[in-house]
Image: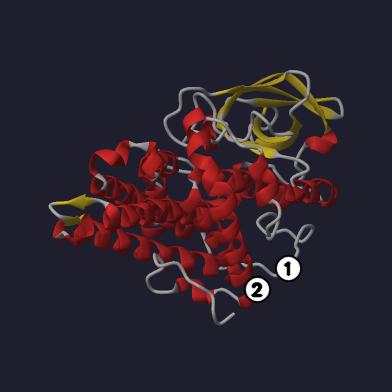
Amino acid sequence: MTDFPTLASDFYGFENALADHEKEALLALRLDAESQLKPLVNDAWDKAEFPREIVDVLHRHPLFGQLWGETRTGEYSALYGGWSALELARIDASVATYVGVQNGLAMGSIGVNGSAEQKAHWLPKLASGEVIGAFGLTEPLSGSDAAQGLRTTATPDGDGWVLNGAKRWIGNATFSDITIIWAKSTVDGQVKGFIVPTDAPGYTATKIERKQSLRIVQNADITLENVRLDAAHKLEKAESFRNTAAVLRLTRADVAWAAVGTAIGAYEAAVAYTKERVQFGKPIAHHQLIQDLLSRSLMNITASIAMCTKVSQMQDAGTQRDEHASMAKAYCTTAMRETVAMCREALGGNGIVLDYDVARFHADAEALYSYEGTREMNSLIVGRAITGVSAFV
């Protein structure tokens, strides 16, 4: 595809590393995102609502299941998956988060840890959007210490299991059909994974209100009161937190990509604004201090794309390790945070008004900075790789 129009914010043309069919798919996604999703997001963000019509738009594209043989519709690389996350996040970070939860966390849990029967049953339905998934790991009293601090319990009961506990910050969970719940076995103390239908007796999801970041994402508090599941709902290969971590390793790099997209969304809005806003007799893009803010933003974006590109290529080659994804997530979210702040500064007072888009990206960046591993936790994963010793506790 020789005439592929790379983004102006892809200053070094990293998109050209994609295969031709991936470029075509990415361009189709870009056009749909700009024409059908972008007009919805500011009002949805303001109302803290999830516009369900975006589900149909998103599931028309090869965004779901590209890593899993049961749902594969062509040879789409992890690099394409990363660019897809970037494209969606440059429109809205919440939209990218929906895909990350559905494809990466919910489908990933089943794709990595499910039996052949579980994968064959659930993955095609999740890929098509017939079934919406969520991922329940974080708890009210357990976030970064999930490996050791889970309080939700799973107790064997005849030929099944009984779950009790609570989860918090669970994206998609107010409208999901299933939620992957991670719970600690009362028998061996190890973390197990379960496919929990959200209509199961004892399962309750309550929307978290008054958020100031990722307002379109419907995060929920979940309570599990004697939720009984048959054996078919336990993920066959999910026997310890290492199995949970294997899912997070796949998705963490896409969060880094989404962070770059969030920075690009703010940057593109700032560039457009500075070409139109007149002060001191000319558009503010003519002023040195504004150009400095924009050029520094583009430097952050370019360095982040380079890191993400390499990490995704390593995933495609089967050489990516935890510390590689963690370094990308830590660096790119930190660079994103600095970038959206500079873009907000370029808009002056209008930088806090939703109509100019930058305010939304600025607020949403705070959630991406924290979820799927804080900067500090990811830094310690890298530090462990550097030194050979763990400093977590």
Image location (x, y in percent) of residue 356: 37, 44
Image location (x, y in percent) of residue 269: 37, 52
In this picture, residue 39 sits left or right of residue 59: left
- Structural crowding at the residue carrying mark 2, measured as other residues with C-alpha within 10 Å and reported as few (<14), some (14–19) or many (≥20): some
Q: Which residue is mark 2?
A: 21
The answer to which of 284 and 123 lies nearer the viewer is 284
Q: In the picture, which quadrant includes the C terminus? A: top left
> Which residue type does callout 2 highlight?
His
Q: Quadrant of residue 179?
A: top right
Instruction: Say which element carries label 1.
Output: loop
In this picture, residue 151 sits left or right of residue 288: right
- Structural crowding at the residue carrying mark 1, measured as other residues with C-alpha within 10 Å and reported as few (<14), some (14–19) or many (≥20): few
> Which residue type does callout 1 highlight?
Gly
The reply to whether residue 108 is in sight is no
The reply to whether residue 381 is in sight is yes
In this picture, residue 162 sits left or right of residue 17: right
Residues at marks 2 and 1 touching, judged by CB atoms closer than 8 Å: yes
Extreme-bottom residue of the structure: 2
Q: Which residue is mark 1?
A: 74
